[in-house]
Image: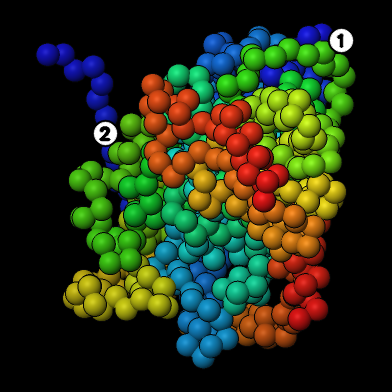
Amino acid sequence: METVAKFEIGYSQSLNVSSQLNISLEQLAGKGISAAQLIEFYRTMSLVRVFDTKAIALQRTGRIGTYASCLGQEAISTAIGNTMAAEDVFIPGYRDAATLILRGTKMEELLLYWGGDSRGMNFSKNTQDLPYNVPIASQCCHSIGIGYAFKLRQQPRVAVVVCGDGATSEGDFYESLNAAGTWKLPIVFVVVNNQWAISVPRSKQSGCQTLAQKAIAGGFSGEQVDGNDIIGCHLKLQQAIDSARAGNGPHLIEAICYRLGDHTTADDASRYRDSEELEQAWKEEPVARLKKFLLNNQLITDQQLESIQQQCSTAVEASVQTYLNTETQTLSSIFEHMYQEMPAGLRAQLTQLESE
Amino acid sequence: MPEMTLIEAVNAAMSYEMAVDESVVVLGEDVGSNGGVFRATDNLQQKYGELRVIDTPLAESLICGMSVGLAAQGLKPVAEIQFMGFIFAAFDQVICHASRMRNRTRGRITCPMVLRAPYGGGIHAPEHHSESTEAIFAHVPGIRVVIPSSPARAYGLLLAAIRDPDPVVFLEPKRIYRAQSENVADDGQALPLDVCFTLRQGSDITLISWGAMLSETLQAAQTLAEQGIDAEVIDLASIKPIDKVTILESVEKTGRCVIVSEAAKSGGVAAEISAIIAEEGLTSLLAPILRVCGHDTVMPMFKLEQKYMPSVQQIITAVSKVMEF
């Protein structure tokens, strides 16, 4: 027998669990990440963590609906937002607050969405980004159309699509990888492997040794990165996006992290998850890891950290106030935007409802 | 004016629009060099290139979901599902995404796509190649469902569907793809969406049908005329939304209605039309509405499919019952 094809899947990490960087700060600056940017990374991750905590509190007090926390996914989400160009298109799942905020989505828009108001997905700034995608993995197919449009128009733009570990079991995921490889589309697939699809652990989701290797079957490369390592995530994302933009086709990044929270506010993970596992995961989480690095290397002071925390709280509070002060949409909004022009039958139903 | 069959009219409409609108792209299985298994996309790839006439991998959900992405970028995808029996893998993309993208982004992102599929029985095809499941799509808010029944209407309605700013499921009655030719001006003139077409004026009874079954319905009307019964025949054409005005005005005039459809009877489009007349036109009725439909069975394999499909005689019998009520 001769070997006709050989594949390998790499794993990389830049900032390890003890907050040690595998290169010098000078080398890191040479790769395009300055100390000032590291502080910005920290600021975004902190902001999302404050937002997340606040959103859960708002849900518990009945002021938004079911909320899907981003806790533990701040690093990969921030890295995506920081490495995409404004003209690229982001195709989210539903735990992508950091990416969306970096792309210009307002926190009050996200709160509107989780608060049960469709205006939340009418992004005021990143107008070509797709809305949150609740059915699992179907957004991967959308990324194919978007990537294909870039190719057809010969635009140097990239589509970045995010899904979770559970999504990699869906047909739409495989169909999309296959198409992306067939047409060599400018798409970066990011699988945020947070180890849990509601109550089903990664080990029961797939017999594949890695999720990244699913890209191989699609005809392109995939790799793993420590998803709790903002620096490693950033470098890998930048590389993949640059490569896709240069016409080298798609790439898949499996970011290994951990869902530190429940699946959503309607879930109770203690029913199916060991507390020891969760405790261990907290020791590896991304925000504290970067904070420790910044402090160890005297890149930030306690006073600056305090000030960042304060600014994040102020910004989140302001968004909450804006959200709470937003009036509910009118009855007719249910019928609006079903079609560009409201058909006669729909208008009659609206008239009937308004008369009741 | 060239003579065209229905399938040639479908081809001509796509070709016309691809020529005048660069944003139109055609995609699906075998739509490229093969020109589609029914030749709906014949020569389009030769004329407009491989980038705009896309042979996709064999993956229906991808075809529909990709179309959602293309449309989100301002293109106008015209996607082909090879047979309606295979459309269900794409249904999630229709109901969860195509139909509601405009609504859930408050108009920020729209979905001007067409999902074409040949549908219906009567061509002695294998399993899964003969179903009429238009009602499943008609139940989905946010899309249009259109079925042409002649070459001219196929041409004009497909142009309208491609130009429509919202998603359209365009179902082509494959039994009559080549059954008749007529002169169709290839002039880019679209027909209106959301309306019925009255094919025959009459005063005694309203016959409503769509797609291939209009052949039997018109034949029945002809025979009935010889018996002194003057039937009005309406081509529903717009399965969603339904043109209530034309239907109710006709029933107001005739006082009677028979609906003819080859789809399974229960929960179908014929039931919806009956409900519309019952709700809004009851006082016009001189007799109960009758439905002449397929049955609530699996579409039989082809040796018995003629027994499943409504016949001219069944339509005449139903009309006689209504007339004698």
The nearer-to-camera label among 1 and 2 is 1
Disc number for residue A8: 2
Spot occupied by residue A113 in the image (x, y as percentages of width and height):
61, 70
Q: Is residue A73 left or right of residue A83?
A: left
Residue A81 vs residue B212, the one in the foreground: B212
Q: CA distance from mark 1 to mark 2?
A: 61 Å
**Going 78% across and 51% down the picture, which residue do you hit?**
B255
Residue A144 in sight = no
Q: Chain of mark 2?
A: A
Q: Is residue A93 above or below residue A308?
A: above
Residue B190 vs residue B274, the one in the foreground: B274
Residue B100 vs residue B219, the one in the foreground: B219
Mark 1 vs mark 2: tell me if same chain. Answer: no
Residue B177 in sight = yes
Disc number for residue B93: none
Mark 1: give few (<14), some (14-19) or many (20+) Cα within 10 Å.
few
Q: Is residue A321 left or right of residue B19?
A: left
Say which quarter of the image contains residue B163.
Answer: top right
**Going 82% across and 8% down the picture, which residue do you hit?**
B2
Q: Is residue A286 left or right of residue B1?
A: left
Which quadrant of the figure contains the C terminus of chain A? Answer: bottom right
Spot occupied by residue B263 in the image (x, y as percentages of width and height):
53, 39
Which quadrant of the figure contains the N terminus of chain A? Answer: top left
Secondary structure under the numbered disc 2 in the rendered image = loop
Spot occupied by residue A282 in the image (x, y as percentages of width and height):
30, 74
- How many numbered dots are placed on residues in this image? 2
Q: Which residue is mark 1?
A: B1
**Going 51% across and 27% down the picture, which residue do you hit?**
B121
